[in-house]
Amino acid sequence: MKSKKIKFLLLIPLSLLLAVASSANDTDLYMASGQGVEANVLIMFDNSGSMNEEIQAFFYDPSITYDPLVVPQANRDTVYYRVYGGGWNLFANSISDVACSAARTALTNKGHYEGYTNSACSSRNRTLRTGNYRNYLASIGGSEYLPKLTIAKRVIEDFLNTIYGVRIGMMVFNYSEGGRIHSTIKTLNDTNRNQLINDVRNITADTWTPLAETLYEAGLYFKGGASHFNSGVVYTSPIQYYCQRNYVIIITDGMSTQDRNSILPSAIGDRDGDQREPIGAPNDPNYPYNGSDYLDDVAKYLYDTDLRSDLTNQQNIITYTIGFTEDNDLLERTAIHGHGRYFYSNNAQQLADAFQDIVNEILEKSSSFVAPLVPVSRMERTCWR
């Protein structure tokens, strides 16, 4: 049997976790192949009210022997029944000793059963669990169901604890119009990492879902312009080098709502030519709650536009999207037009896997900016502010 501890961890290959470490004072120093300029990554986190909904976060695997937290490992196939008022008593020494065939099947495949337990499966109503299933529940805190917000925050926290070699910040939605920078993009030293984790823990879910407006605001942040949705805010661009890649990772559990600010038709428009915009266009999906289809247009705009004309080359944004329990083509089209990738995740592990795949791609792309064994002094001449 396999043995497993349930925990939120991103197992990112060590070979890809390469932090940038250089000295500008010694022309004989070299940067190893793959140690490129750290990319800027802004996580656009859905803090809408629907993130408070509970979903099944974990899934029992009968092939795994879970840590013996409440039942000895030798009793993994022992069957227990729930007694009135709480607690568990011995029902059968093994699954094969249970008389009802339907109960045996459920206990074998799912680890638990609620129903009749006599040989005809017609009487003696019981709630049954195997010892292994009881250990599984103990390992995940007692319930397979958690709010989506809790799941996403835990996954991101573990993501932040295991990632090196990128600069990361967070963005969340305002209550109705646009979004705001929750944590500015920073290099992940110990101090910044701990602060960012605390910022994630403090996120609450109580807004609408202005996806396009918030992504547009993200572009203003990267540009170093004045905020459109936050009065009096003027951003400092996180872009440090002309050859630095910039990314937005959108994680959301729903469709666009309260997402029709006039800046979208005036500054963005139907950039992808799908005639889904503006409101009332021939292919307008007519989203409820004042939603819109501008998100993919904003992603295309941010990829096509030079956000820092004061630097050499084009400074643009690549957009990745993750549909968390919500699979919709707007997120897929957004990733296509933003030259990233779209991921759908339905539970904690799939969400963690999506983040792992995205960051692996980002690290691989970022490492390509510096050729193998290029002297630091030459890099300064070719990749500097």
Image (cartoon, rainbow, N blue to C red):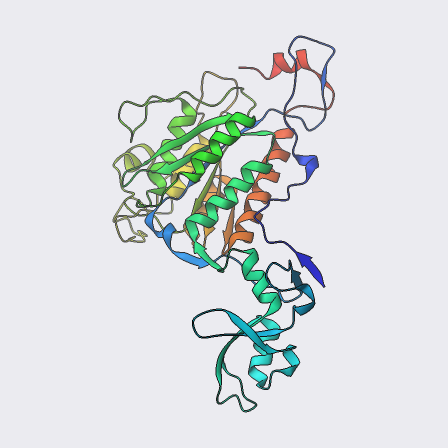
Which percent across, then down, holds residue 179? 34, 36
Using the rendered view, name the quadrant where residue 137 is placed: bottom right
Q: Is residue 245 left or right of residue 51?
A: right
Q: Residue at x 26, y 48 (%)?
A: 290
Which percent across, then down, holds residue 268? 34, 35
Q: Nearer the viewer, residue 306 or 57?
A: 57
Q: Residue at x 59, y 17 (%)?
A: 383
Q: Residue at x 52, y 88 (%)?
A: 121
Tally the marks. Answer: 0
Q: Is residue 212 left or right of residue 154?
A: left
- Report whether residue 195 is seen: yes
Q: Nearer the viewer, residue 10 or 314?
A: 10
Using the rendered view, name the quadrant where residue 17 is placed: top right
Q: Does residue 113 sit above or below 266 in this rendering?
A: below
Q: Does residue 274 sit above or below 34 in this rendering?
A: below
Which percent across, then down, holds residue 133? 58, 66
Q: Residue at x 65, y 77 (%)?
A: 93
